[in-house]
Amino acid sequence: MAVYKETKTNTWRVVYRYTDWQGETKQTSKRGFITKREALAWECEQLNKTQADLDMTFESFVETYTQDMKSRMKENTWHTKEHIIRTKILPFLGKRKISNIKAKDIIAWQNEMLNGKDKNGKPYSPVYLKTVHNQLSAIFNHAVRFYGLRENPAAKVGNMGKAKNGEMLFWTQEEYEKFAFAIMDKPISFYAFEMLYWCGIREGELLALTAGDFDFGKGTVTINKSYQRIGGRDIITDPKTPKSNRTIKMPDFLCEEMKEYFSKIYGLQKKDRVFTMSKSYLHHEMDRGAKEAGVKRIRIHDLRHSHISLLIEMGYSAVAIADRVGHESINITYNYAHLFPSTQNDMADKLNNFRKERD
């Protein structure tokens, strides 16, 4: 590496060469440093990154982490992770050398997060706090596993927050029907929420649906993609998990409703998206409909909970429900155990009878 003074601009420039992972020599440079000290500091940091020297700052290691991991993730997944790193982690730990960050520093950072507020002035939810900590811990784990960091200080401290919100909200069928009647004045809203409630699909799955995904002869809709809006672009990705790829049998009335909806869309082609509204539109309609119907406001995702709770009430098993909604059956059992009919009394009676027969 070399540092030069550029007389025309009276600033400093750094030029350095390095060997990439294929063994080829590369050269790059950066100019515009006001002082030689700044240029030398940047030069030193680049050497640390090139040599994977953990004397580098946490911010520099995040650049290495990004190069290693970004291409391995879905664009929407990375977008979420990058936002958390940029807004919740780097402002606090970015300038610290990664090898010097200790458990006490993580505790101090956690306290900042626990006392922090979101854009509406409300404390961060326990679920969000856990997500943020998990992201920090993932970066340290990467440094431990591949770059020789001795230990993960975030793992040593332990997590904050919790994995799930305590309360699971959902609508009864009666509540949903009141809501559906309230939004019937806007057909596109009505048909979208009918799909969400009666099929239990995710919001991104709904917005990714194309006309070709519907088979009205068989009365089915195929879920094989998800929609995200990232950086002003429409992004279509694979569904959330491999299990999410599925074909759902629609009830007859829903099949007829969707036929009616299709007939209202001029020139609809098989590859055309059926619901082209934004997620914010759906949230606005949820606000409007709940208020007009006089029912509690739930999240869009809670319509999925509502569908699952309805199927449980109708007597379907966790395995059958999991196949329909694209979950693992163990997750259905764990997350909705309180909704399944209790068999404790029946078990006790059979144990009593078993004992009596043995006596």
Image: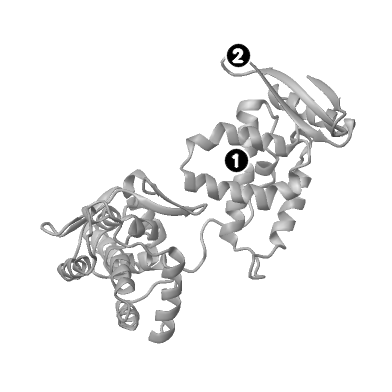
Amino acid type at mark 2: Glu
In depth, the one of 170 and 353 nearer the eye is 170
Kindly tell me whether residue 80 is visible in this rendering: yes
Mark 1 belongs to which amino acid?
Ala
SS assignment at label 2: loop
Tell me the distance, in whole angstroms, between the alpha carbons under discs 2 and 1.
30 Å
Tell which tag, 2 or 1, sits nearer the viewer. Answer: 2
Location of residue 12 (image quadrant): top right
Q: Residue at x 41, y 59 (%)?
A: 335
Which image quarter: residue 252?
bottom left
Q: Are marks 2 and 1 in contact (CB under 8 Å)?
A: no
Quadrant for the C terminus, please. Answer: bottom left
Q: Is residue 321 left or right of residue 83?
A: left
Q: Is residue 140 left or right of residue 176?
A: right
Look at mark 2 in the image and give the residue it sits on: 24
Please say which color scheme the image uses. Answer: one colour
The residue positioned 71% from the left and 18% from the top of the image is: 17
Provide residue 110's location: percent of width, then percent of height: 71, 53
Residue that sits furthest to the front in the current view? 8
Per the image, label 1 sits on a secondary structure element best described as helix
Question: Up-down: is 21 above or below 264?
Answer: above
Q: Residues within 10 Å of mark 2 (few under 14, many from 20)?
A: few
Q: Residue under circle 1?
A: 138
Q: Which badge, 2 or 1, is on the more N-terminal residue?
A: 2
> From what the image shows, is residue 207 above or below residue 36?
below
Q: Is residue 29 above or below residue 75?
A: above
Q: Which mark is residue 15?
A: none
From where the camera sits, is residue 294 visible?
A: no
- Residue 68: % across, % down: 57, 31
Residue 16, x across and y down, in percent: 74, 21
Residue 301 quadrant: bottom left
Q: Residues within 10 Å of mark 1 (few under 14, many from 20)?
A: some
